[in-house]
Image (cartoon, grey):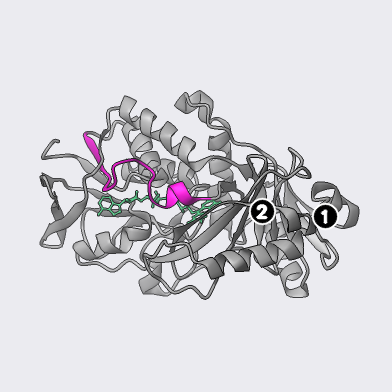
Amino acid sequence: MRNKADAVIIGGGIIGMSVAYHLAKEKFGQILLLEKERLPGSGATAKAAGGIRAQFSTKVNIEMSMLSEKMFASFKDEIWNDALFDRVGYMFLLEQEKDIENFKRGYDLQKELGLNVEMLKGDDIRKLAPHYNLDNVRMATYCKDDGLGDPYEFMAGYESAARRAGVEIKYDTEVINIVVANDVIKSLKTKTGEISTPLIINCAGPQAKLIGQMAGVEIPVEPVKRQIVTTGELDFIEPFFPMVVNVKTGLYTHKESKGLLLGWADKNVESSFDISVDPDYTDNILERALNCIPGLETAEVGNQWAGLYEVTPDHHAIIGWEPELGGMFHVTGFSGHGFMQAPAAGLLTAELLTNKIPSIDISPLAPERFAKGALVDETNII
Ligand SMILES: Cc1cc2nc3c(=O)[nH]c(=O)nc-3n(C[C@H](O)[C@H](O)[C@H](O)COP(=O)(O)OP(=O)(O)OC[C@H]3O[C@@H](n4cnc5c(N)ncnc54)[C@H](O)[C@@H]3O)c2cc1C
């Protein structure tokens, strides 16, 4: 491994790989990516449900996802990889007045920004989710351009493209310390040696806060456990079945192999690095799922797992220079949307680091917002 690099990316998940590829494409210089695990994408990326949507409540999140959707759709041409963006659509089911009002506001903004989103009622909802219990559902928002993808496959596509573009990638290489002098990054340390660099890009996902702490800065990114359950084969799932989110219960479902993937965010889980599967969490998911989809009564549980969201106080990513320290750039804190926003995050990071005009305005994502109290809360979170 080299002992000097123009930039060191910490973290080999989908964000680190996307940043590596886009930066190398800009001919940034010698780029080294360090990942502590033996395989890429072993962190949150491997645990993601694969949802890709632009139906958010803030301009910056809508634009980040719209840009990413465009990039997912042209992935094969640009990255030479067959990872599939399956545009089955995303539907949010609304039961309560407060949610209807909130989603109508989101719908207006999404329309204004050019998203192909619709408000649906009655039979139009039933046609898309015929097996769903829709008794209390009053309305839905639906975007047929949203959909699903396999996070690991897209991550692997970026990994190969980054290598082809000259990035050196090292696995089983944990960053254990960062050396700072006069408030400027000098080098970082791994178990096998020290690497001097003027630039560290923090793509450590749920561990991003620990990377900041090694350099003496605080980044508000908390690891929070989320769980998923899949079912065995189901005969009532159509190939066009979209991602369906019941906003009141928080249950989300999409087709997974020949069955369904079921997920739900327990908002009472405390921040920790625990990723053991909690049987009570599983029961909570299954209980919600049975209420929403009566046909699941005879379904078998296929698989289940837990992973970590990387959550910020306003549920928006942090992309930008660390204000307290020279030479550290953060690309983290996606709060459960890091897979779907990874293409845009990589592109925008490369644009900012090479002093180009960014494709979209991501100033609301700058790390300074926390000290300034300029948070922009995302309300459409699952
Ligand atoms: C259950 C679940 C469902 C989800 N569903 C979706 C979804 O449907 N759609 C969506 O867009 N997002 C989803 N997400 C969120 C998504 O998985 C994350 O936002 C995304 O994977 C973040 O990518 P990352 O590269 O930042 O993090 P990671 O994939 O965690 O990568 C960070 C990497 O940094 C490495 N690292 C950490 N510390 C060090 C160190 N000191 N030295 C070297 N390497 C280090 C880690 O080993 C890890 O591989 C979900 C997450 C979970 C847990």
Please provide percent x and percent y for residue 232.
65, 46
Earlier along the polypeptide chain: callout 2 or callout 1? 1
Residue 40 higher or lower than 297, as above or below: above
State the residue in front, 266 or 374: 266
Residue 8 higher or lower than 325, as above or below: above
**Which numbered marker is on residue 120?**
1
Distance Cα–Cα, label 2 vs label 1: 18 Å
**Which numbered marker is on residue 346?**
none
Please provide percent x and percent y for residue 285.
62, 64
Horizontal side of 201 relative to 358 (left or right) equals left
Instruction: Count how many numbered circles sit on residues in the image.
Output: 2
Query: What amino acid type should be assigned to the residue bearing mark 1?
Result: Leu
Query: What amino acid type should be assigned to the residue bearing mark 2?
Result: Thr
| Range covered by the magenta-colored residues | 30-48
Badge 1 residue CB within 8 Å of ligand 1 = no
Report which residue position mark 2 lands on: 253
State the residue in front, 353 or 71: 71
Quarter of the image containing the C terminus? bottom right
Q: Secondary structure at mark 2?
A: strand
Q: Secondary structure at mark 1?
A: strand
Asked if residue 13 lies in the magenta stretch, the reply is no
Please provide percent x and percent y for residue 47.
47, 51
State the residue in front, 12 or 276: 276
Q: Does residue 164 show up? A: yes
Q: Residues within 10 Å of mark 2 (few under 14, many from 20)?
A: many
- Residue 218, by quadrant, is bottom left
Residue at 31 percent of width and 29 percent of height: 163
Quarter of the image containing the N terminus? top left
Residue 156 higher or lower than 259, as above or below: above
Residue at 82 percent of width and 65 percent of height: 137
Please provide percent x and percent y for residue 10.
27, 48
Residue at 13 percent of width and 36 percent of height: 2
